[in-house]
Amino acid sequence: MSKKRTQKLPKALAAKVKPLKALLLDCDGILTDAKVWYGGDGSWRRSYSIRDGFGLKKLIDAGFTVGIITSSATEDIRERVASLKIPHFYEGRFDKVNAFNDFKKKTGFKNNEVAYMGDDDPDVPLLEIVGFAATVADALPSALNAVDYVTQNKGGDGGVREVCELIIENSKLYRSLINAKV
């Protein structure tokens, strides 16, 4: 018999997670290990964690909205987004706050209802305004200094899954879904 691992959060952090309804992510360095390789046919390729993908699927199945905001614009990212059925996708967006504002107009969410994971300088302005900001263990110092939570895992290696589990276990939306099923 296995025990369920529930992460006990400090009160201040739990208060930021509780109202969450959406998770937005950067791609390179968050969903990937920040490495790209050239395919020889003009394409760029990245490696993605199946565990991170399953965490996002669990989050979506639990009623959360998920989206990606990336400055990259490549086919492999589009393929990953499509395979995970992520409904909100902003590619080639260097101004991530502007993309976030577009997302809020489409969804009606407020800042405190959205979490964002980013790992680099362009992510910092958005990390500073969302309700819950997270990054991966191998993020750059600017991102590490701008977040509420740093994962134990690295980008492309379970960091996203860790945040998905934390949100699922501690959010008000998830709790209300569980109670509705009982």
Image: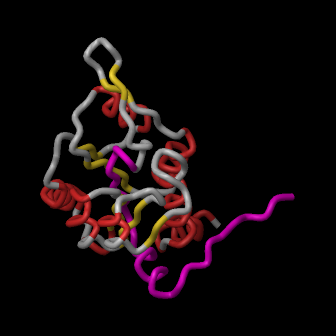
Tell me how many marks there are.
Answer: 0
Identity of the residue drawn at 47% across and 45% down? 156
Residue at the far bottom in the pictured view: 11
Residue at the far right in the pictured view: 1
Residue 173 sits above or below residue 158 on the image: below
Numbered range of the magenta stretch: 1-29
Residue 103 sits above or below residue 4 on the image: above
Which quadrant: the N terminus?
bottom right
Q: Is residue 86 magenta?
A: no
Residue at the far front in the pictured view: 141
Left or right, 154 with reference to 147: right
Q: Nearer the viewer, residue 97 or 66?
A: 97
Percent x, y for residue 47?
Answer: 45, 33
Percent x, y for residue 150?
Answer: 46, 67
Percent x, y for residue 36?
Answer: 36, 32
Q: Is residue 22 magenta?
A: yes
Task: State whether the magenta stretch is mostly helix, strand or loop.
Answer: loop
Percent x, y for residue 96?
Answer: 19, 56
Q: Nearer the viewer, residue 127 or 144?
A: 144
Identity of the residue drawn at 25% across and 72% down? 128
Quadrant for residue 106, please give it: bottom left
Identity of the residue drawn at 40% across and 78% down? 16
